[in-house]
Amino acid sequence: MTANKPEKPQAIYIDTNILFQNGHSLDTTKFSELINYTRFLDIKIYIPKVVFEEWVYIKTQAALKYKQQLHISSNSLGSLLSREPLQYEEVKISYDSVKEISINILSNKNIEIIETPLIDINQIIDRAIKLIPPFVKQDKGFKDTLILFTLLNHIKNNSFKYIIFISNDDIFQQNSIKDEFPDTYKINICKNIDDVIKELTENINVKIKGEIEKEKEEIISYLNNNFEQIKTFIQQNAEFSDDFIKGSNVFSSIYNPKKEEKIDAPIKKVLNINPLEVSLVVITNDDTDNSEKEISFNVDYEFELLIEGFTWLNVLNMMNPPKIPISKPEQFFSKSDYPYLFEDREDRVKKVIRMINVKATINYSDRVYNNLKLIKVESF
């Protein structure tokens, strides 16, 4: 129902401290997960300009430090081995070079830098004097105030109604900061990426479930339109056993998601086998760089059986269950008519649905499925 659909944020903003929670790289598992989630849900990530400039500055200082350490290590190793200093790549490091690299990193991750708006300096001075958060001291809180004003301006200009701000700075957890945002806005301030992932998970689950189900329905429709090809392939390649028909084989339960009724009595004869439809599809390998998809699907077959009354044991079938070609059901009688213990001779006709599993590949291009290649059939 629409009423239960989770609310999706329209934008996510990131503070400097979040960028350094897992070192200097944005390729950590958690950050990559956040990027994948937001791309999937079509949520934009923004970084205030002042956050970006601070991030670049810290990265530049760290790079210069590492370069110096590399130089010292090279000289030390040369002295230790009584040789010339170890040669290493001479990296040219400057604020501008790191800035250019950082812009490319953010661009590749679809993260946008937002400019600091024009702010009345008297307004900032007034907040500093009165220690209005984010100011906690007259000389501390300037950067956070710029971040706050940047967010307020950007949210207003884009008419966002629900946003997430990721910052582990306690100052942003204060209610006085949240009160800066109009009542018409919903803002969730998260301290780390894990909290955001939890916030987005319900949205992810709803969208994934909807898209997966839609894709499965489209594939099932395509397969049923090619049912003659599938039916012929099964007819030529499938085998079935007594256990498969009874639904007692351990693998039968895997390919029997509908939990069809099991048969505990001996099957005397297979009277008829009727293919029905493709009922279940699983995409086993979906290479986004390739139009080909590997799929596994179930085909419902109706077995009309002549079965005997309840018996405790079919000794020979348990030791050596015969496999019968699905194209020759009449052979079932001759191969499975072994002696039973405690037989009841009342015969009855019963119909059961069993699923035969098929492995295949299909192509998906220009929003159309085609080129069905049937690979393997399993009936156990």
Image: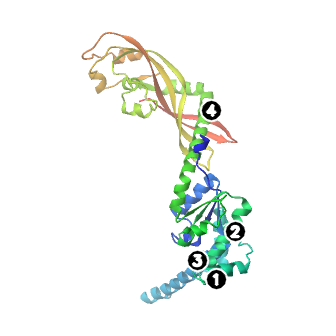
Q: Tell me which label, 3 or 1, sits earlier in the chain.
A: 3
The kind of secondary structure element at disc 1 is helix
The kind of secondary structure element at disc 2 is strand
Residue that label 3 marks:
59
Find the distance from the CA under tag 2 to the CA under tag 3.
Answer: 19 Å
| Disc number placed over residue 129 in the picture, else none | 1
Which quadrant would residue 175 be assigned to in this image?
A: bottom right
Residue that label 2 marks:
114
Q: Tell me which label, 4 or 1, sits earlier in the chain.
A: 1
Which quadrant would residue 292 be assigned to in this image?
A: top right
Q: Tell me which label, 2 or 3, sits earlier in the chain.
A: 3
Q: Tell me which label, 4 or 2, sits earlier in the chain.
A: 2
Residue 109 sits above or below residue 282 on the image: below
Residue at 63% over, 40% down: 363
Q: Marks 4 and 1: which is nearer the front?
A: 1
Which quadrant would residue 109 be assigned to in this image?
A: bottom right
Assess whether mark 4 and mark 3 are in contact (beta carbons under 8 angstroms).
Answer: no
Q: Marks 1 and 2: which is nearer the front?
A: 1
How many residues crowd mark 3 within 10 Å: few (<14), some (14–19), many (20+)? many
Location of residue 2 in the rendering, given as x and y in whole percent from the top left corner: 61, 42
Determine if residue 69 is in view. Answer: yes
